[in-house]
Image (spheres, rainbow, N blue to C red):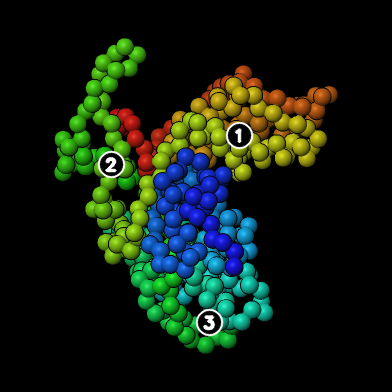
């Protein structure tokens, strides 16, 4: 039997793809080590702005398991959008649909000729990643959301380790059985838009007004006072209840992880080294056209600085900014490269592209936004 990886080894593997989220990586590594050892694992709720790395972390988990057949056969990974659960909740089938997807995914891993008992065992020891879980709020704008309530209740049925009635798909016999969901690991994630502002309001102007004290800051020889707010320091369970996450649902998560805002050095690493970075994708495209694409260090840092102005988009802002820099060369790469077959993007190229964009006024990027783990100066 293959030796199971330690949490340190799992974290090292995940960190090759996930940047700047040490706490989330550590929490996931410990949970995965326990799961691979067939131990009970607490569920995880991740809160972080779009582009902060939630989905990237789960893809890294999938890659880690798939790279080692001995590990892959220990866990099936299913990713599902919370909105899908909400839609299925309206017809009363979200739990059954979720179990069916797990069963189909396990069958893909084990093969169509695998015995149903083995497929069931594989599926019921799986990992379920529910993305954008903040979209199944129990109420929105002060009004009850029936679909959100039903979706949370359906997940609760599976999370609470109950015996779940389930009809097998036709290819598995079609009979009704009872499924033990106690070994499933649920990882739910969402951006929770508006949560940052709600908590900031509570501690500065709401019921807890005055608890956040200004601090004295010396900056460039000048002394002034400012509020330094971090959602990590001030968020409490009641804030999530007010957001629309029911107490019963929240209580099923052993860990609530707030992802960190991505600093410029993190964005730079993602841009230059990320598996899915816009730079790597563009380099692959230009290479297919016989052109070598390079970006100077100064240009990369200029792109990163521009992307960092968009905290709401996180790493996704990198692709948005770089797309605006490179798109003018994509139609005719060889002419852009010249006789040497090499196209070098420098800082002045970035500045010209961004200046042209501003003159046109067609930027899709918005500098407004929040980050679930944001810390530093409070919003004005």
Q: Check disc 1 and report its element: helix, strand or loop.
A: helix
Circle 2 residue: 233
Write the residue at 16% across / 42% down.
208
- Farthest top residue? 221
Write the residue at 32% across / 46% down.
195
**CB-based contact (under 8 Å), mark 2 and mark 3:** no
Q: Is residue 346 left or right of residue 212?
A: right
Q: List x then y, in percent, for residue 166.
A: 46, 81
Q: Nearer the viewer, residue 105 or 204?
A: 105
- Neighbourhood count class around disc 2 (C-alpha, 10 Å): few under 14, some 14–19, many 20 upward: few
Q: List x then y, in percent, for residue 236.
A: 25, 49
Mark 1 and mark 2: Cα distance apart in space: 32 Å
What numbered label is drawn on residue 272?
1
- Neighbourhood count class around disc 3 (C-alpha, 10 Å): few under 14, some 14–19, many 20 upward: some
Give the mark nearer the N terminus: 1 vs 3: 3
Q: Nearer the viewer, residue 265 or 129?
A: 265
Above/below status of 237 relative to 76: above
Q: Is residue 293 left or right of residue 33?
A: right
Write the residue at 33% across / 31% down.
376
Residue 259 placement: quadrant: top left
Mark 2 and mark 3: Cα distance apart in space: 46 Å
Residue 119 placement: quadrant: bottom right
Q: List x then y, in percent, for residue 231.
A: 31, 41
* Residue 21 appearing in the image: yes
What numbered label is drawn on residue 168?
3
Is label 1 or label 3 in front?
1
Give the mark nearer the N terminus: 2 vs 3: 3
Write the residue at 52% across / 34% down.
267
| Quadrant holding the N terminus | bottom right
* Residue 242 appearing in the image: no
Above/below status of 150 relative to 171: above
């Amino acid at each position: 039997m293959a030796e199971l990886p330690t949490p340190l080894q799992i974290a090292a593997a995940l960190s090759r793809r996930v940047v700047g989220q040490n706490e989330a990586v550590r929490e996931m590594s410990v949970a995965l080590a326990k799961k691979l050892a067939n131990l009970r694992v607490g569920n995880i709720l991740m809160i972080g702005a779009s582009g902060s790395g939630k989905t990237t972390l789960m893809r890294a988990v999938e890659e880690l398991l798939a790279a080692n057949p001995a590990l892959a056969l220990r866990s099936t990974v299913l990713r599902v959008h919370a909105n899908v659960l909400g839609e299925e909740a309206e017809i009363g089938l979200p739990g059954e649909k979720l179990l069916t997807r797990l069963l189909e995914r396990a069958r893909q891993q084990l093969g169509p000729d695998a015995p149903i008992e083995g497929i069931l065992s594989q599926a019921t020891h799986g990992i379920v990643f529910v993305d954008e879980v903040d979209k199944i709020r129990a109420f929105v704008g002060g009004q009850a959301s029936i679909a959100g309530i039903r979706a949370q209740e359906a997940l609760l049925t599976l999370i609470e380790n109950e015996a779940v009635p389930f009809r097998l798909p036709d290819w598995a016999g079609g009979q009704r059985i009872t499924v033990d969901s106690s070994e499933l690991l649920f990882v739910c994630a969402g951006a929770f838009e508006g949560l940052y502002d709600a908590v900031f309001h509570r501690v500065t102007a709401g019921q807890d007004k005055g608890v956040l004290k200004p601090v004295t800051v010396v900056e460039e020889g000048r002394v002034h006072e400012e509020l330094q707010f971090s959602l990590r320091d001030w968020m409490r369970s009641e804030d999530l209840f007010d957001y629309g996450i029911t107490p019963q649902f929240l209580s099923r998560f052993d860990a609530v992880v707030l992802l960190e805002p991505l600093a410029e050095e993190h964005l730079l690493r993602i841009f230059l080294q990320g598996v899915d970075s816009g730079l790597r994708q563009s380099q692959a495209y230009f290479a297919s056209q016989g052109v070598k694409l390079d970006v100077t260090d100064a240009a990369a840092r200029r792109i990163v600085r521009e992307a960092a102005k968009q905290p709401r988009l996180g790493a996704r802002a990198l692709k948005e900014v770089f797309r605006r820099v490179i798109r003018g060369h994509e139609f005719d790469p060889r002419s852009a490269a010249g006789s040497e077959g090499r196209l070098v993007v420098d800082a002045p190229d970035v500045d010209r592209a961004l200046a042209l964009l501003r003159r046109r006024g067609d930027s899709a990027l918005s500098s407004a936004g929040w980050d679930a783990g944001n810390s530093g100066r409070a919003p004005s």
